[in-house]
């Protein structure tokens, strides 16, 4: 393995650490975490788009995402709160790291990251809105209800439909001959996504 594949992600991980630390000066801890995650999602979307459609080196996606994942694993270990959700996050991050080190010419992880992070943007907006409602003492504002519907629609189209499509392409990818263990593990992440979609759906139904 190229030593730079270890060095650059760690540098980016340090960047996300200090970004989060700076955001914590102006925001509550959980909102700062959400803002850090939003920065990663937004930057990944931009870099993935440029890589896919303007032929910018895909290595930038790798170092940005792997750096963020390393930072987040460190953060989870640091807070020392190993509940089911945090364990799922660690599993998610390790599986995703094993996936994005595969050759992009033979796999679809650039497309996967693009649509996955696009589907994450409404999640971040809903989180901000819910926190704002709580601060105002409102159960659920009109804006939050609109965002929840938008979140449900976007998540279904991008995460369930598009990522399902690329997941099938990976499983039946005849361009590779090696064992597809990372692909099978990523398929488990897709199941996590379906579970989260059901949770979003229930959140929307609660209104009624």
Image: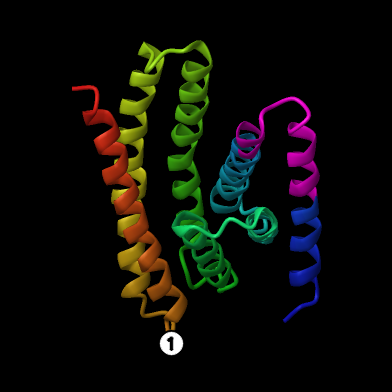
Q: Position of residue 121 (x, y in %)?
A: 49, 36
Quarter containing the N terminus: bottom right
- The structure residue drawn at horizontal position 42% and vertical position 79%, both measured from the top left corner, is 175
* As drawn, 119 above or below 58: above
Residue reaching furthest bottom? Answer: 178
Tell me which corner region of the image, top left, top right, bottom left or bottom right, holds residue 192: bottom left
Tell me which corner region of the image, top left, top right, bottom left or bottom right, holds residue 166: bottom left
* As drawn, 51 above or below 40: below
Q: Position of residue 160 (x, y in %)?
A: 30, 50
Q: Secondary structure at mark 1?
A: loop
Q: Position of residue 66 (x, y in %)?
A: 65, 60
Residue 75 visible, this angle: yes
Inspect the magenta stretch and tell me whether residue 20 lies in it: yes
Given residues 136 and 114, the one toward you in this image is 136
- The structure residue drawn at horizontal position 44% and vertical position 32%, both measured from the top left corner, is 122
Given residues 94 and 74, the one toward you in this image is 74
Residue reaching furthest left? Answer: 208
Left-right relation of 206 to 81: left
List the residue tagged with mark 1: 179
- How many marks are shown on the rendered structure? 1
Inspect the magenta stretch and tell me whether residue 44 lies in it: no
- The structure residue drawn at horizontal position 75% and vertical position 55%, both measured from the top left corner, is 13
The overriding secondary structure of the stretch rendered in magenta is: helix
Residue 68 visible, this angle: no
Q: Position of residue 76 (x, y in %)?
A: 63, 56
- The structure residue drawn at horizontal position 34% and vertical position 48%, both measured from the top left corner, is 196
Left-right relation of 111 to 32: left
Q: How is the image coloured?
A: rainbow
């Amino acid at each position: 393995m190229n030593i730079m594949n270890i060095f650059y992600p760690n540098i980016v991980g340090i960047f996300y650490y200090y970004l989060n630390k700076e955001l914590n000066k102006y925001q509550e801890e959980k909102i700062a975490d959400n803002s850090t995650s939003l920065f990663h999602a937004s930057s990944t979307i931009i870099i993935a788009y440029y890589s896919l459609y303007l032929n910018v080196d895909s290595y930038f996606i790798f170092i940005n995402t792997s750096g963020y994942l390393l930072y987040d694993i460190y953060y989870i270990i640091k807070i020392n709160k190993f509940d089911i959700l945090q364990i799922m996050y660690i599993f998610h991050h390790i599986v995703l790291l094993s996936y994005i080190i595969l050759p992009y010419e033979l796999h679809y992880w650039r497309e996967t990251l693009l649509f996955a992070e696009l589907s994450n943007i409404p999640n971040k907006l809903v989180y901000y809105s819910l926190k704002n409602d709580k601060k105002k003492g409102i159960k659920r504002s009109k804006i939050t209800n609109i965002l929840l519907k938008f979140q449900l629609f976007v998540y279904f189209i991008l995460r369930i439909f598009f990522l399902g499509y690329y997941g099938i392409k990976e499983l039946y990818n005849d361009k590779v001959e090696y064992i597809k263990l990372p692909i099978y593990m990523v398929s488990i992440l897709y199941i996590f996504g379906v579970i989260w979609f059901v949770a979003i759906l229930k959140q929307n139904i609660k209104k009624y």
